Image (cartoon, rainbow, N blue to C red):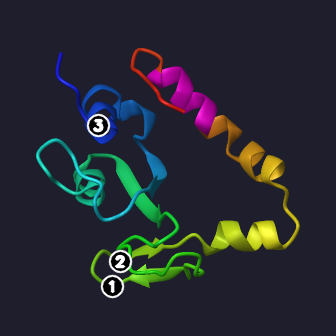
Amino acid sequence: MPVLPGIDVLLGDRPGLIADRRVGLISNASGVTHDLTSNVDALRRAPDVQLTALFAPEHGFYTLVANGAAVESSVDPTIDLLIGTNKVRRALENGVSVIDLVASWADGLDQFVRASRPYFLYR
């Protein structure tokens, strides 16, 4: 059995998990499918999926932000999607606890974990 990137497994074996939903992607510009299609393009081409936002790691989606610097939310003109981690950072700065923040994601994460059980999921 070949090893595939998670995006290939999601779109190939489990597309119903994100069908007819607004989807946010945690990635950076190096995220690709097995044939080197960007994760962003793969999700945009997927039927019945509305890619709404990108959440980038510490250095931003294009890895242009210096270590430890704030990643400002923005709309990327080339892909026309919201990019950034500032919303999460602001929530934490405004007193939302990490526990409450993670709890707000519980339903979606639980659904993902249930669907991914046939696969190896490294946490």
Q: Nearer the viewer, residue 96 or 66?
A: 66
Q: Nearer the viewer, residue 44 or 66?
A: 66
**Residue 91 in the image: x percent, y percent?**
77, 68
- The tag on residue 80 is 2
Q: Residues within 10 Å of mark 2 (few under 14, many from 20)?
A: few
Q: Is residue 75 above or below residue 33?
A: below
**Residue 6 in the image: x percent, y percent?**
33, 36
Mark toward the start of the polypeptide (1 vs 3): 3
- The tag on residue 77 is 1
**Residue 43 in the image: x percent, y percent?**
30, 52
Looking at numbered disc 3 in the image, what kind of residue is underneath it? Leu
Q: For the stretch drawn in magenta, what is the main secondary structure?
A: helix
Q: Is residue 8 above or below residue 53?
A: above
Disc 1/disc 2 C-alpha distance (Å)? 5 Å
Residue at 74% x, 74% y is: 90
Mark toward the start of the polypeptide (2 vs 3): 3
- Check residue 112 for magenta coloring: yes
- The tag on residue 11 is 3
Q: Is residue 93 above or below residue 3?
A: below
Q: Disc 1 on helix, strand or loop?
A: loop
**Residue 2 in the image: x percent, y percent?**
17, 22
* Residue 54 relative to residue 7: left or right: right
Which segment is the magenta one? 109-116
Residue at 54% x, 21% y is: 114
Q: Disc 3 on helix, strand or loop?
A: helix
Looking at numbered disc 2 in the image, what kind of residue is underneath it? Asp
